[in-house]
Each structure stands twice: as structure tokens, then as C-alpha cells.
């Protein structure tokens, strides 16, 4: 298995630099974690891009739930996406559900069109809150640029979704499975042994919680765990 990808949530350039120093491979850039991560400003992206040389995936989300909202909110989100693209962003995170928990394919397509050709993106944890995971996979599979599903396997987090994650590991021809959402270090041996090779953390590398910053040493500890030889549990 190749070296696992380690993605860290960043809120600003300070977080980004600490994550990079600790060995993160990629950032998910968001604002407002009280709402579980919304779209950051163009200025914040520019500051992060100037601070680090690792890939930065920018969240495209305007609400605390997983709906795109009304027409005005959708328009504003598309405009924000285009502005971020103009600033140099070329990797994104998005995903929308309708009121029944089905994939809102029209909204997803609008945002994919807004970020344009050549951009890569993650379908985020909306997949954990949907009515039918396979319906989401089927609906978005093959959309331009999709290369990752970020999932805990359950809306309640990795503890509850671990069995599903292990069952979904290694599906041929699928976007990469990135595990995040209540991920702990003690989950890693089984996930790594199953062949999962992408991991995502946020609060786990912030000793002071979301009110504090990313800690480079905490990131480094996770990096070392991910790079250790895999032992079958």
C-alpha cells in the first residue's frame, strides 16, 4: 500500500503551517466549525495558499445542514466557488442532499460546473447522512473531478460506522475512501489493515479544541502512526 494520505482541517494560515510542519499531505480549508465547516473567504484561501505548498481542498457549503438552500443561496455559493477558482483554488469539498435525504444531483452538478474543468473534489460526509449510500455513489459516480468520498461510515461517527467502512474498503473503480468524523488513533490498525489509505482529522490535532489552533506535534504523532508498519489486529 502506498503512503497514506493525511488530511487536516485548517481554519487559517496558522493552522495550515502547523499542519504542514507536522506532516499533513493535504488541507481541508473551512470556516465556522460551529456549523461543521462552511465556505471560507477568498482572502483566507489566498493567505493559506501563500503559507503552504501542499494541496488545499476548499469547502463549498453555506448551511449547517446538507442542503444547498434556496435559489439565492445556490447562486451565492456558485459565485463563491468561481471566485475561489479565480484565486487559484483547484481542489474542493462539496455534497448536497434534498429534503428526503436523496442526493441533490442538480445542486452538485451546478457546483461542479462552477468550479470548472480540471478541478478535483471530495464528496463529503453528506454521504453519512443520506437515505441510501449506494444511491449517492451511483448518482455522483463519474462526475468530472470526483476522486474522493469523505465518510465515517455513519452519521454518528467512525465508532458506529467502522464495520461499514471495512466492508467498503478496496472497491475497484471507486473514488478513494477517506475516513474522517470522530476518527481516533485506535481505529487506525483495522482501517489500515483493510487497505484504507486516506484519513482526515480536525479536533484530534487541536489540544485546545476548536477554540485553539492545530498543533504541529499532534499532527506529527498521527503521521507517525499512519506511517508505521501495518500489523493485522
Image (spheres, grey):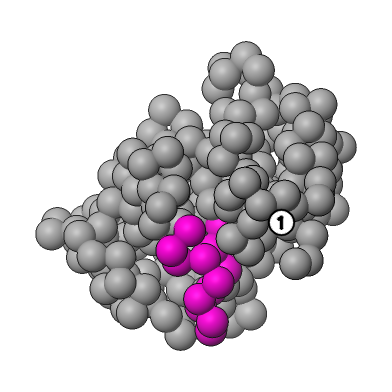
- Tell me where residue 219 appears, x and y as whole percent: 75, 34
- Tell me where residue 217 appears, x and y as whole percent: 81, 26
- Tell me where residue 50 appears, x and y as whole percent: 82, 47
Circle 1 packing at 10 Å, graded few (<14), some (14-19), many (20+), is some
Query: At 13% from the left edge and 59% from the top edge, which residue is drawn?
Result: 100
Quarter holding the N terminus is bottom right
Query: At 27% from the left edge and 73% from the top edge, which residue is drawn?
Result: 135
User: As rendered, which of 219 and 61 lies closer to the eye?
Assistant: 219
**Residue 169 on the magenta span:** yes
Q: In the figure, 141 relative to 103: above or below?
A: below
Q: In the figure, 26 relative to 176: above or below?
A: above
Q: Quadrant of residue 29?
A: top right
Which segment is the magenta one? Answer: 166-178
Q: In the figure, 66 relative to 10: above or below?
A: below
User: As rendered, which of 86 and 200 lies closer to the eye?
Assistant: 200
Residue 232 visible to the viewer:
yes
User: As rendered, which of 176 and 208 lies closer to the eye?
Assistant: 176
Asked whether, in this view, residue 226 is left or right of residue 30, the answer is right
- Tell me where residue 191 appears, x and y as whole percent: 58, 52
**Number of marks in the rendered image:** 1
**Residue 14 on the magenta span:** no
Query: At 42% from the left edge and 38% from the top edge, which residue is drawn?
Result: 159
Say what secondary structure mark 1 lies in. Answer: strand
User: As rendered, which of 2 and 41 lies closer to the eye?
Assistant: 2
- For this orientation, the residue located farthest to the front is 233
Give the residue number, with chain letter if any, for mark 1: 5
Residue 9 visible to the viewer:
no
Q: Quadrant of residue 98?
A: bottom left
Amino acid at each position: 500500500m502506498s503512503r497514506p494520505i493525511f488530511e487536516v482541517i485548517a481554519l487559517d494560515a496558522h493552522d495550515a503551517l502547523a499542519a504542514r510542519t507536522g506532516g499533513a499531505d493535504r488541507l481541508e480549508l473551512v470556516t465556522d466549525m460551529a456549523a461543521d465547516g462552511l465556505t471560507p473567504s477568498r482572502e483566507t484561501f489566498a493567505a493559506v495558499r501563500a503559507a503552504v505548498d501542499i494541496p488545499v481542498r476548499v469547502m463549498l457549503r453555506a448551511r449547517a445542514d446538507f442542503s444547498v438552500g434556496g435559489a439565492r443561496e445556490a447562486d451565492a455559493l456558485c459565485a463563491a466557488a468561481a471566485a475561489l477558482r479565480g484565486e487559484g483554488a483547484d481542489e474542493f469539498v462539496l455534497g448536497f442532499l434534498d429534503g428526503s435525504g436523496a442526493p441533490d444531483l442538480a445542486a452538485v452538478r451546478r457546483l461542479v460546473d462552477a468550479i470548472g474543468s480540471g478541478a478535483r473534489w471530495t464528496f463529503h460526509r453528506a454521504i453519512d447522512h443520506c437515505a441510501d449510500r449506494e444511491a449517492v455513489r451511483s448518482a455522483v459516480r463519474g462526475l468530472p473531478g470526483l476522486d474522493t468520498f469523505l465518510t465515517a461510515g455513519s452519521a454518528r461517527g467512525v465508532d458506529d460506522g467502522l464495520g461499514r467502512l471495512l466492508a467498503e474498503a478496496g472497491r475497484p473503480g471507486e473514488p478513494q475512501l477517506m475516513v474522517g468524523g470522530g476518527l481516533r488513533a485506535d481505529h487506525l490498525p483495522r482501517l489500515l489493515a483493510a487497505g484504507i489509505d486516506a484519513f482526515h482529522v480536525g479536533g484530534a490535532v487541536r489540544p485546545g479544541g476548536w477554540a485553539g489552533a492545530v498543533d504541529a506535534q499532534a499532527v506529527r504523532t498521527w503521521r507517525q502512526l499512519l506511517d508505521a508498519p501495518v500489523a493485522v489486529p
